[in-house]
Amino acid sequence: MTLKNSIKLPLLLLASFWIIKLIEIGTGNNFGDYGIYPRTIEGLKGILFSPFLHGSFLHLISNTFPFFILGTTLIFFYPKIYVKVFIAIFLLTGFGVWLIARPAFHIGASGVIYGFAGFLIFSGIFKREFKSILISIAIVIFYGGLVWGIFPVILGISWESHLVGALVGVLCAYIFRKE
């Protein structure tokens, strides 16, 4: 897969994140109620919608660059499995947050970002291939600071989404280690 083709899906999804935020601001609505609200039937819709919703422009900006870089890396270096990995991270992270998180609306793409990072780091460990190990090292160097996000350090940040996303990414790296 070419780099040009690898950026299409992340750019399309990022465009939808931004368009939704602009619609939310333009209409004066708050779409946060479409996020994940744990252990409620109503909150299940958030499994599909929460990655597209962001609490502020700062929240959206902080998710934009890692989503683009890690999503593009996933697609470029794992072209045969990225669809399965992406869908698994997207859905299982949302479901995991719905199962274990504290009662609050959980929104944003950071759980998916942590899933991408977990997958890319642990694929190198599980595959033990030179290319995968180099990708793992690069992700640790550039995104190693993400590890602090899995702890309940900052009030109002869904550390549960970060933790579940990272664990789902590691699980996907293990499951798809031979592909």
Image (tube, rainbow, N blue to C red):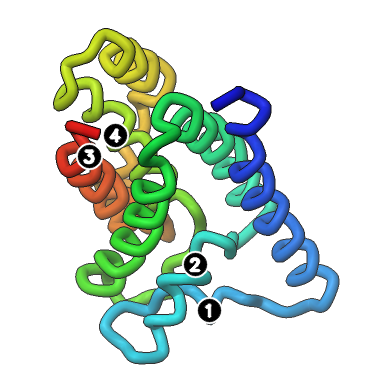
> Which residue is the site of mark 1?
34
Type of amino acid under label 2:
Ser
Query: Dot 4 surroundings within 10 Å: few (below 14), some, or many (20 or more)?
Result: some
Identify which residue, 47 or 79, lies in the foreground.
79
Classify residue 166 by image quadrant.
top left
Q: Position of residue 173 (x, y in %)?
A: 23, 37
Residue occupying the point 84% across, 70% down: 26
Classify residue 1 by image quadrant.
top right
> Which residue is the site of mark 3?
176
Type of amino acid under label 1:
Tyr
Query: Dot 3 surroundings within 10 Å: few (below 14), some, or many (20 or more)?
Result: some
Type of amino acid under label 4:
Val
Query: Given contact means CB atoms under 8 Å apart, are the residues at marks 4 and 1 in contact?
Result: no
- Closer mark to the observer between disc 4 and disc 3: 3
Count of number-bearing discs = 4
Disc nearer the start of the sequence (2/3): 2
> Which residue is the site of mark 2?
50
